Image: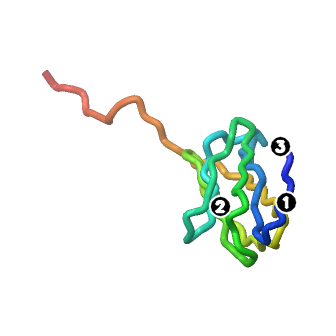
Amino acid sequence: MVFEPGTDGLGRVAGSVCDRKTGGPLWGAAVEIWNTDFGSITDEDGRYIIEEVLHPGRYTLVASCVGYWGDSALVEVKPGSTTVIDFRLRPTEVDIRLGPDVPESKH
């Protein structure tokens, strides 16, 4: 994926989201600019891009994925450039049970 900054004074954010333990890419992770309508979903390589919709300034970038703890980063968007932010999410510990704990019948 090639990122070429625009010339319209807006900036963009791009990067990747991967598993902290394995380093593998996380497909379908959400990456959003907090408190805005701007965001993206990672592709099969764990890459995302939030296109040229951001005015220069500081934003909080939030990454989340089912089965992982979310993370955030402060990002400074500069006019006409792409700011790269990569996330390494930590898996959550999930207790998966095959069924409810039901006491044995006394019949």
Identify which amino acid the numbered label 1 is placed on: Pro
Q: Secondary structure at mark 2?
A: strand
Please say if the residues under marks 3 and 2 sit with CB atoms less than 8 Å apart: no
Which amino acid type is marked by label 2?
Asp
**In the visual, does 54 lie left or right of 67?**
right
**Point 68% across, 73% down: residue:** 59
Judge the density around disc 2: few (<14), some (14-19), many (≥20) Cα neighbours within 10 Å: some
Label 3: few (<14), some or many (≥20) within 10 Å? few
User: Are the residues flagged by discs 2 and 1 in contact, CB closer than 8 Å?
Assistant: no
Rounded to the nearest angstrom, the CA distance separating label 3 from label 1 is: 13 Å
Residue that mark 2 sits on: 71
Q: CA distance from mark 3 to mark 2?
A: 23 Å
Residue kind at label 3, given as amino acid type? Met
Of badges 3 and 2, nearer the viewer stands: 3
Q: In this orientation, which residue lies closer to the viewer: 18 or 15?
A: 15
Q: Give the farthest residue toward the left.
A: 107
Q: Earlier in the sequence, mark 2 or mark 1?
A: 1
Please, which residue is most extreme toward the front here?
8
Q: Residue 81: x percent and y percent?
A: 84, 65
- State the SS at label 3: loop
Residue 4 located left or right of residue 100: right
Residue on which the image places disc 3: 1
As drawn, the residue found furthest toward the bottom would be: 57
Give left or right: position of 29 versus 81.
left
Along the viewing direction, whichever of 92 and 6 lies nearer the viewer: 6
* Disc 1 secondary structure class: loop
**Residue shown at 81% from the left, 72% from the top:** 79
Which residue, given by chain and number where applicable, does mark 1 sit on?
A: 5
